[in-house]
Amino acid sequence: MIGRDLTETWPAFQLWENGSDGGEINWNYLVNTYGAQTVTITDCRVPSADSCLEDTTLSEVIRGWLGAEHDPAKKDQPLLYVKDWHLARWVSRNPAIQPFYTTPYLFADDWLNYHYCNFTDDDFRFVYLGIQGTSTPFHKDVYDSYSWSTNVIGRKLWTFWAPDDEARKQPGVELVQGAGETVFVCVALLSSRKIFLPNLTPGCYP
Ligand SMILES: O=C(O)CCC(=O)C(=O)O
């Protein structure tokens, strides 16, 4: 885990947070700036949620979270999570939109995104946005790559296991990532992440 200094100059900490104390998501900014974008969502109540991805607009998702009828305690309501959102790509193509992050020097050497950004229409720089209880199931990163992930708002619980099957039968190693902290996941770890407080997480996956 890397401390807050690494990303303290990121505009996201001003743009996406409400008030001077931080800690709360600035929903108005997200809706006004990014609301029309199509994002991919999963319902974290459904086992293997990653297998039932759907597309909708960001405004629709936020409207659902903030609506009077939304009660995350009710198990019959969906628990939506915005996943693999290509926000960095969209911002880089829209000069009128203020960038929300810069790649820290430690992670500048990124062969995978260099290739994808320059020679394809795809990339592996993602933002995740969710409310308390949303999570990403057990997985390892694309093409066995390394990854890094900075938490902008909220706290995130990570659980890591060593890559062999035997290790998965043991409890994993847990780590709580606070706002501004960056987790680096090396290829030797399989990883599963659970988010138990509101989070908004720019991630770039070399
Ligand atoms: O933040 C998350 O929910 C998932 C992040 C992720 O999948 C990753 O860093 O590999």
Image: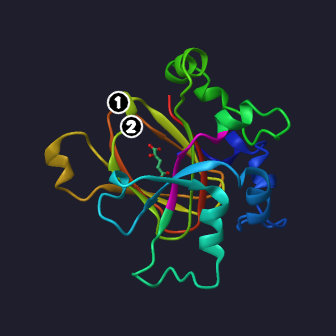
Is label 1's Cβ within 8 Å of ligand 1? no
Q: Residue at x 62, y 47 (%)?
A: 3
Which amino acid, by three-letter code, is at mark 1?
Asp
Q: Nearer the viewer, residue 48 or 39?
A: 39
Count of residue discs: 2
| Whole-percent x, y for residue 179 in the image | 64, 57
For residue 10, which quarter of the picture?
A: top right
Q: Secondary structure at mark 1?
A: helix
Q: Which residue is mark 2?
A: 141
Q: Residue 200, how many percent across, how many down?
A: 62, 56
Q: CA distance from mark 2 to mark 1?
A: 5 Å
Residue 163 colored magenta?
no
Looking at the rendered structure, the secondary structure element under dot 2 is loop
Query: Residue 193 in the image: x percent, y percent?
Result: 41, 55
CA neighbours of label 1 inside 10 A, class few (<14), some (14 to 19), many (20+): few
Residue position for label 1: 144
Residue 94 point in image, percent of width and height: 78, 34
Q: Is residue 98 left or right of residue 85?
A: right
Judge the density around disc 2: few (<14), some (14-19), many (≥20) Cα neighbours within 10 Å.
some
Whether pointer 2 and pointer 1 mark residues with C-beta atoms closer than 8 Å, the reply is yes
Please give the range of residues in magenta: 81-87
Main secondary structure type of the part rendered in magenta: strand
